[in-house]
Image (cartoon, rainbow, N blue to C red):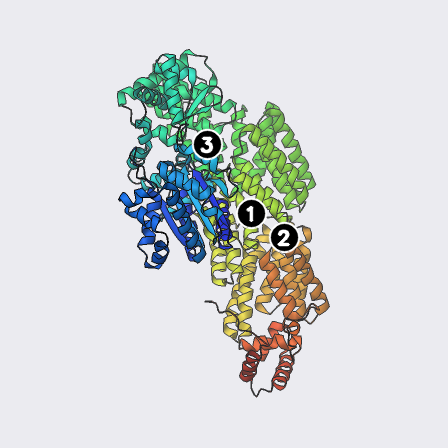
């Protein structure tokens, strides 16, 4: 905690380091660093000072201290001078400026010096220091500076050290912006200083939520629950110190503000008058924000006294004015500290007052949540339950499922504590129906596991003999939620029970929906015939009963199950019909399922450009319905990024992912997967930054899939065959369903792992380790069998689309590379397969094709492929791929550009090809290994080696390398440790 990592200050740090760079170049600049208490000013200055010291600058730091009305004059400067006086290196400089030396001792001698002499002496000393080495002067907490220190600073920046010939000087001075009330003495000085041409102002704003999250996770070695991290981030509001304090209290505090932090926050509050404290206590009960009229009625003070108290609170920056005649606490934790300081009886009384005032005013729907809160805190539980139910209804009307869930859970919590006669009469007002409604809200809010838990609670409370329709509803709702969390066998069991509880005749909408859910579950567990039979039967009933949204849902299932599936023209026409039916019925979740199915069908057909308008339409519809965190919009977000990635629109993929990030629920982080694919290809992904986190907590199917792709490819790119295969197998095992059917992504994962396996087998074969090469060739054959089964059968027992078959073609080519070496025809097939629109994977296959063509001595064709790979790598910004293809071009002599040796000042006696051979000789390669790396025969390599020995007058390979080093024909290569 004493030295937290520096997070989220890249821009500010770059600006301050720029000031240091200018100081080292001989300039003099100053920056006034502003920010609220705890926002991280000292941490930034510490980082800058550490870097300045490493770069050879002299660093001096002085601190201002809050000593009330009896401040010590020149305190930060005497601290600086004391450091200089204690270092023998600076004794000659201090002797040249005796007036400064006397300032340290104080007393009569110092008093005889005029202020101007003193100021000139300090400026002269600092200038002399800067001539010795660039100088950084740091002054912290100017808001506590005494008048003499402020005057000296004014002199130094306006006429002193920044304005006289010297070495470079940088002056960085910090102050708390939230401490500067209207009459603070630092205000006029700051206004004066920022007008100076050599002085800039830099404000440290609160950290973004994502940055606070990084800080919290960096500070805590043990993993924290996501809910705990999120709560800390919300309460800290971008303040690094507050985040650290809240984190430190996670093990000891049940709630509220940690005691040490509360003491800090209450200091300024306790400096207010009694009346102002009373007003703030009342405002704290109202919440973070309070209307003026409501506060006036609650505090019951004369208007003049209230205004004076508010003016005092605003001047001390505890409150800030807002729109619509409101006030809010500057920071939520300050409000929490004041609230916690209330006596229990006082707190309940004020909550009751606010509840009554809100109830007596216009009963706007948006006050229901506030009324519920105040009634509950004032211990009026019946009124709290009624208001919570009103708030849930309002949240549902405005499309806010997360808020609806929160209020419904409050209702369920209060339910047993309220007498049945005092409970409100409400449609669906029994506990089971309310729990079922809460599970629906949870599903719509993206809290899939919470939805399952709530539906199980409803199932435990239902009496199926008294109400079989309700019992069926609970079961098919539970089945749908279990499908979302991939508990497929249990889902099928519950949907079967739901269908058995109610007869098909006389037909009812409940039976239709039970049947529609059973179709989904049956398809997921491989019961295709059952799914088709029930879907066709239920569609007839839905049409007869005119249950339009259920009819749409069944049409979607049939589009997937019948004919060529959702990627066929017939399937997509049926999906468009389902979309229109769902839209006419007003059932947004079913409409979203139709739009997602249309988009994924186009993707599976290889028609990527057609996907994007459908996904935009779907996400717009989800936004209007407040369902952006539900299952299909999350899938749409992932698919949108995947399409952008696949089309090579990588910058757009990254920017879209960044825009999505703040709105995603914890369960939706997997949607960033394609942005991680981009970062991996560009060499900028730290593997554990996100993918590993997807494997923590409850099992998430899509999260596991994304993590598996990223982590397998990362291992393959790093050349770690063992890890790549292990990650591929672990992922496939986790994603294989209860019936043993592997996921469609298996073919992609095996192809990625096979690339590392082929690399490893080739390395061993080149080194002469035939047994080792055979071992990895066997693994390659095994993995290829897995890939073939996955691609040719697919999840729905149908061959996969263009993407799946392209990955199979790559897997076939990689397996051949592992077992017998590069095969041009196999790689040509992979290139053709990826030509449907994935430029990066196409480039990766073309790179392997170029290698295979070189091995077959088809250099002209290899040059064409390599040039295409290079163009794609440059366009996409993929440096690793660019580096590899450039190395291939150089080794294969696929360009007319001369070698580095040929362009040196002294011409080399060796040809460009002999230079390549010489570099490999220096690495200890045999003739055979040289031939394989340069795509020439071992015999040709031997001829080149003989020519090198003759030209250099060497009797052996080792002597030739030694001569080459001595003559500067080759240079030493860095070692791995270097």
The Cα–Cα distance between marks 2 and 1, rounded to whole angstroms, is 13 Å
Element assignment for label 1: helix
**Could you tell me if residue 737 is visible in this image?**
no
Describe residue 456's horizontal placement relative to residue 543 as left or right: left
Given residues 822 and 407, the one toward you in this image is 407
Q: Position of residue 728 (x, y in %)?
A: 50, 56
Q: Position of residue 307 (x, y in %)?
A: 39, 17
Question: Which of the 4 quarters of the picture holds residue 156?
Answer: top left
Given residues 99 and 684, the one toward you in this image is 99
Residue drawn at x 32%, y 33% is 257
Q: Which residue is mark 2?
A: 876
Element assignment for label 3: helix
- Which one is earlier in the sequence, the residue at label 1 or at label 3? 3
Element assignment for label 2: helix
Question: Which of the 4 quarters of the picture holds residue 447?
Answer: top left
* Comparing labels 1 and 3, the label whose residue is closer to the camera: 1
**Could you tell me if residue 383 is visible in this image?**
yes
Callout 3–callout 2 Cβ contact below 8 Å: no
- Which one is earlier in the sequence, the residue at label 3 or at label 2? 3
The Cα–Cα distance between marks 1 and 3, rounded to whole angstroms, is 27 Å
Question: In the rendering, which numbered label is found on residue 442?
Answer: 3
Question: In the rendering, which numbered label is found on residue 835?
Answer: none
Q: Which residue is mark 1?
A: 675
Q: Residues within 10 Å of mark 1 (few under 14, many from 20)?
A: many
Q: Is residue 88 above or below residue 237?
A: below
- Which one is earlier in the sequence, the residue at label 2 or at label 1? 1
């Amino acid at each position: 905690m004493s030295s937290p990592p520096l997070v989220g200050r890249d821009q500010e740090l770059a600006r301050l380091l720029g000031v240091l760079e200018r100081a080292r170049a001989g300039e003099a600049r100053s920056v006034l660093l502003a920010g609220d208490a705890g926002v991280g000013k000292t941490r930034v200055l510490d980082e800058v000072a550490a870097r300045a010291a490493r770069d050879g600058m002299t660093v001096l730091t002085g601190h201002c201290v809050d000593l009330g009305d009896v401040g010590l004059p020149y305190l930060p400067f005497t601290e600086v001078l004391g450091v200089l006086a204690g270092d023998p290196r600076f004794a000659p400089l201090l002797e040249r400026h005796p007036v400064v030396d006397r300032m340290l001792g104080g007393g009569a001698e110092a008093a005889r010096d005029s202020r101007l002499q003193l100021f000139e002496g300090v400026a002269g000393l600092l200038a002399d220091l800067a001539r010795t080495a660039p100088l950084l002067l740091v002054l912290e907490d100017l808001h506590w500076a005494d008048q003499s220190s402020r005057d000296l600073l004014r002199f130094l920046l306006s006429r002193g050290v920044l304005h006289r010939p010297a070495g470079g000087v940088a002056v960085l001075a910090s102050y708390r912006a939230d401490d500067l009330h209207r009459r603070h003495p630092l205000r006029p000085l700051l206004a004066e200083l920022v007008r100076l041409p050599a002085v800039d102002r830099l404000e440290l704003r609160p950290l973004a939520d994502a940055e606070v999250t990084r800080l919290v996770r960096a500070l805590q070695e043990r993993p924290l629950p996501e809910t705990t991290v999120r709560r800390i981030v919300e309460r800290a509001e971008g303040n690094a110190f507050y985040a650290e304090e809240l984190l430190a209290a996670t093990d000891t505090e049940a709630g509220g503000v940690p005691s040490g932090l509360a003491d800090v926050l209450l200091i300024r509050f306790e400096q207010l008058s009694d009346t102002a404290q009373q007003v703030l206590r009342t405002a704290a009960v109202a919440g973070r924000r309070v209307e003026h009229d409501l506060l006036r009625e609650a505090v019951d003070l004369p208007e003049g006294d209230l205004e004076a108290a508010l003016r005092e609170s605003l001047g001390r920056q505890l409150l800030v004015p807002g729109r619509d005649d409101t006030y809010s606490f500057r920071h939520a934790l300050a409000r929490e500290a004041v609230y916690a300081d209330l006596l229990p009886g006082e707190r309940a009384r004020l909550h009751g007052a606010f509840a009554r005032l809100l109830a007596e005013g216009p009963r706007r729907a948006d006050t229901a949540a506030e009324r519920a809160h105040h009634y509950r805190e004032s211990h009026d539980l019946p009124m709290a339950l009624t208001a919570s139910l009103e708030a849930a209804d309002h949240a549902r009307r405005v499309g806010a499922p997360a808020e609806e869930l929160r209020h419904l859970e409050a209702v369920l919590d209060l339910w047993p504590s309220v007498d049945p006669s005092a409970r409100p009469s409400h449609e669906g007002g029994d506990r089971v129906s309310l729990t079922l409604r809460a599970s629906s809200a949870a599903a719509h809010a993206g809290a899939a596991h919470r939805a399952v838990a709530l539906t199980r609670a409803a199932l435990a409370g239902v009496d199926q003999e008294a109400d079989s329709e309700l019992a069926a509803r609970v079961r098919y709702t539970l089945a749908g939620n279990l499908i979302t969390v991939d508990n497929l066998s249990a889902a099928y069991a519950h949907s079967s029970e739901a269908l058995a509880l109610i007869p098909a005749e006389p037909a009812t909408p409940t039976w239709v929906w039970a049947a529609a859910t059973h179709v989904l579950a049956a398809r997921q567990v491989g019961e295709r015939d059952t799914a088709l039979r029930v879907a066709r039967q239920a569609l007839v009933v839905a049409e007869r009963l005119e249950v339009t949204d259920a009819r749409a849902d069944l049409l979607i299932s049939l589009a997937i199950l019948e004919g060529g599936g959702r990627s066929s023209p017939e399937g997509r026409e049926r999906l468009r019909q389902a979309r229109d039916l769902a839209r006419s019925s007003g059932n947004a979740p079913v409409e979203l399922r139709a739009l997602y199915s249309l988009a994924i069908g186009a993707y599976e057909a290889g028609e990527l450009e057609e996907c994007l308008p459908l996904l935009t339409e779907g996400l717009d519809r989800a936004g209007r319905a407040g369902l952006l965190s539900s299952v299909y919009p999350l899938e749409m977000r992932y698919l949108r990024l995947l399409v952008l990635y696949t089309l090579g629109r990588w910058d757009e993929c990254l920017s879209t992912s960044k825009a999505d990030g703040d709105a995603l629920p914890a369960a939706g982080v997997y949607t960033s997967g394609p942005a991680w694919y981009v970062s991996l290809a560009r060499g900028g992904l730290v593997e554990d930054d996100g993918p590993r986190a997807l494997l923590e907590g409850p099992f998430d199917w899509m999260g596991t899939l994304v993590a598996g792709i990223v982590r397998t490819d990362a291992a393959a790119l790093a050349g770690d065959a063992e890890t790549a295969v292990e990650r591929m197998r672990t992922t496939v095992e986790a994603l294989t369903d209860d019936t043993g059917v592997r996921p469609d992504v298996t073919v992609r994962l095996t192809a990625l792992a096979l690339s590392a396996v082929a690399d490893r087998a080739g390395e061993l074969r080149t080194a002469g380790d035939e047994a080792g090469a055979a071992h990895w060739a066997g693994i390659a054959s095994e993995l290829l069998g897995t890939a073939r089964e996955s691609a040719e059968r697919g999840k729905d027992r149908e061959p996969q689309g263009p993407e799946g078959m392209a990955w199979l073609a790559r897997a076939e080519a990689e397996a051949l590379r592992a077992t017998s070496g590069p095969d041009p025809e196999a790689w040509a097939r992979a290139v053709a397969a990826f030509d449907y629109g994935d430029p990066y994977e196409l480039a990766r296959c073309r790179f392997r094709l170029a290698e295979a063509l070189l091995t077959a001595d088809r250099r002209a064709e290899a040059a064409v492929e390599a040039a295409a790979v290079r163009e794609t790598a440059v366009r996409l910004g993929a440096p690793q791929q660019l580096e590899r293809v450039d190395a291939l071009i150089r080794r294969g002599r696929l360009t007319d550009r001369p070698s580095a040796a040929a362009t040196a000042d002294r011409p080399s006696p060796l040809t460009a090809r002999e230079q390549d051979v010489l570099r490999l000789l220096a690495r200890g390669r045999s003739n055979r290994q040289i031939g394989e790396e340069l795509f020439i025969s071992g015999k040709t390599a031997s001829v080149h080696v003989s020519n090198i020995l003759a030209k250099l007058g060497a009797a052996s390979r080792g002597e030739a390398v030694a001569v080459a080093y001595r003559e500067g024909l080759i240079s030493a290569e860095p070692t791995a440790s270097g």
